């Protein structure tokens, strides 16, 4: 909600004044957040004695390797979308107010997905939702690349919920499913670190080089193609896992 409200408000303020004002307001709000944070209670937790064993199991699991590879690519693509969208909109002559409204549309679509997250997980499961989110993410990025209209780019922000929101819901649940007993928190840390840490950093840096080489539209196109590769990898890995399960069941029979 804060993201969606701040988008158009800051865009309007920047349009009336200058971009410098947005940084001043951001600094003031961060000071308020810091003041609240230092007053919050901190609870001490003890790590499980089997952390090392669980980490070794995660490191040697091909299912984890595939999952984290897919999330790394998705994180890189998301970083490109987040960090370079406004540059693209500026290139398409969109006003700062419309840039802010693009965040509102993205937030509304994400809220809708989060509201029905439990029902979606129950109905479709983590694998199907993750595949759907990758498909929507690819369509969103390829749509950016294909259009030369700021209005279309802003409208494509409605795919933020079905792409990022759906992906995050499914990824959190998937990491919990794949986690060894007692290692759920560590699994979530790996998921977050690879997606929003390593993947996002790689996407931000690589996106800059691609942008300088071929331009923003082509950069989004390459990012969309990479997500399609991740989707294919995930589908093939799921098929292999299903075949292994069938063989194991047949062997027991």
Image: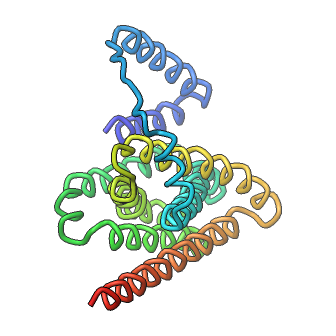
* Left or right of residue 126: residue 65: right
Please give the name of the residue rendered at 41% of the width and 73% of the height, measured from the top-left corner: 131
x then y, percent, for residue 186? 44, 42
In the rendered image, the vertical position of residue 128 relative to residue 243, given as above or below? above
Quarter of the image where the C terminus is located: bottom left
Please give the name of the residue rendered at 41% of the width and 29% of the height, measured from the top-left corner: 47
Q: Nearer the viewer, residue 86 or 2?
A: 2
In the rendered image, the vertical position of residue 167 relative to residue 239, given as above or below? above
Q: Nearer the viewer, residue 147 or 121?
A: 121
Q: Residue furthest front?
A: 252
x then y, percent, for residue 120? 22, 65
Which quadrant holds residue 1? top left
- Give the mark count: 0
Please give the name of the residue rendered at 51% of the width and 41% of the height, measured from the top-left corner: 52
Q: Nearer the viewer, residue 15 or 229?
A: 229
In the rendered image, the vertical position of residue 138 relative to residue 154, given as above or below? below
x then y, percent, for residue 50? 43, 39
x then y, percent, for residue 89? 58, 55
Which quadrant holds residue 182? top left
Please give the name of the residue rendered at 50% of the width and 21% of the height, measured from the top-left corner: 25
* Left or right of residue 218: residue 143: left
């Amino acid at each position: 909600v804060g993201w969606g409200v701040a988008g158009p408000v800051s865009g309007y303020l920047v349009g009336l004044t200058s971009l410098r004002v947005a940084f001043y307001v951001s600094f003031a709000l961060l000071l308020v957040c810091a003041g609240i944070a230092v007053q919050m209670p901190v609870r001490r937790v003890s790590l499980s004695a089997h952390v090392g064993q669980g980490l070794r199991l995660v490191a040697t699991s091909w299912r984890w390797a595939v999952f984290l590879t897919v999330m790394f690519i998705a994180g890189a693509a998301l970083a490109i979308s987040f960090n370079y969208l406004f540059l693209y909109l500026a290139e398409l002559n969109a006003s700062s107010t419309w840039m802010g409204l693009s965040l509102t549309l993205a937030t509304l679509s994400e809220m809708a997905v989060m509201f029905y997250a439990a029902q979606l997980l129950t109905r479709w499961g983590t694998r199907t939702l993750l595949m759907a989110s990758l498909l929507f993410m690819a369509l969103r990025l390829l749509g950016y690349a294909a259009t030369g209209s700021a209005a279309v780019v802003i409208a494509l922000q409605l795919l933020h919920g079905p792409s990022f929101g759906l992906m995050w819901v499914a990824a959190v649940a998937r990491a919990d499913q794949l986690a060894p007993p007692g290692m759920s928190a560590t699994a979530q840390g790996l998921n977050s670190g690879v997606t929003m840490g390593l993947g996002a950093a790689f996407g931000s840096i690589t996106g800059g080089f691609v942008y300088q080489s071929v331009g923003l539209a082509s950069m989004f196109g390459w990012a969309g193609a990479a997500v399609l590769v991740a989707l294919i990898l995930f589908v093939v890995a799921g098929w292999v896992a299903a075949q292994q399960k069938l063989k194991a069941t047949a062997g027991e029979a």
